[in-house]
């Protein structure tokens, strides 16, 4: 009986941890979206990195990270008057 209770308790802990991981990912992605809307791109990247730390294969986080990073690179190039290089980056996004 103790063995069954121990197994059940272990399973519940695993399910709880997995559920929390998904919650962290969703919350991080939502925070990143808010940061993007507020033009706080560095904060967005940090939130997306947190999501990717939890799940490196999360497509939404990977796509958003790529877009934000590309935007920052393109903006820097535009500020340096390197328009053609910036256009290439934007085209790749």
Image (tube, rainbow, N blue to C red):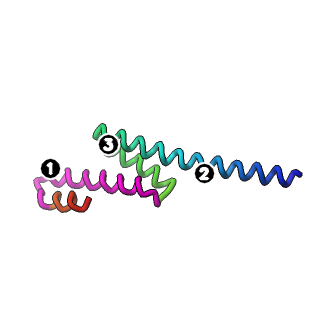
Give the residue displayed 35% in from the left and 40% down from the top. 35
Residue hosting label 1: 79
The mark that comes first in sequence, 1 or 3, is 3
Residue hosting label 2: 18
Give the residue displayed 60% in from the left and 51% down from the top. 18
Judged from the image, the secondary structure of the residue bearing numbered disc 1 is: helix
Q: Position of residue 61 (x, y in %)?
A: 41, 53
Crowding near the residue tagged with mark 2, few <14, some 14–19, many ≥20 C-alpha atoms within 10 Å: few
Residue 36 is marked as 3
State the CA–CA distance, disc 2 to disc 1: 44 Å
Give the residue displayed 20% in from the left and 50% down from the top. 75
Q: Nearer the viewer, mark 1 or mark 3?
A: 3
What span is colored magenta in the figure? 57-84
State the CA–CA distance, disc 2 to disc 3: 27 Å
Q: Position of residue 32 (x, y in %)?
A: 38, 44
Judged from the image, the secondary structure of the residue bearing numbered disc 2 is: helix
State the CA–CA distance, disc 1 to disc 3: 20 Å
Image-based side of 3 in relation to 63, left or right: right
Crowding near the residue tagged with mark 3, few <14, some 14–19, many ≥20 C-alpha atoms within 10 Å: some
Question: Residue 83 versus residue 7: which sits nearer the camera?
Answer: 7
Give the residue displayed 33% in from the left and 45% down from the top. 42
- Is residue 26 part of the magenta span, yes or no? no
The mark that comes first in sequence, 2 or 3, is 2
- Is residue 79 part of the magenta span, yes or no? yes
How many numbered circles does the render carry?
3
Classify residue 59 by image quadrant: bottom left
Judged from the image, the secondary structure of the residue bearing numbered disc 3 is: helix
Find out whether the residues at labels 2 and 3 contact each other: C-beta distance under 8 Å: no
Dominant secondary structure (helix, strand or loop) of the stretch shown in magenta: helix
Q: Position of residue 60 (x, y in %)?
A: 40, 54
Crowding near the residue tagged with mark 1, few <14, some 14–19, many ≥20 C-alpha atoms within 10 Å: few
């Amino acid at each position: 009986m103790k063995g069954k209770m121990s197994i059940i308790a272990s399973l519940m802990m695993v399910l709880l941890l997995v559920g929390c991981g998904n919650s962290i990912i969703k919350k991080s992605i939502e925070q990143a979206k808010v940061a993007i809307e507020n033009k706080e791109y560095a904060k967005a990247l940090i939130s997306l990195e947190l999501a990717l730390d939890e799940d490196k294969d999360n497509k939404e986080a990977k796509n958003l990270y790529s877009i934000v990073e590309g935007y920052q690179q393109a903006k820097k190039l535009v500020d340096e008057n390197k328009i053609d290089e910036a256009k290439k980056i934007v085209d790749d996004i």
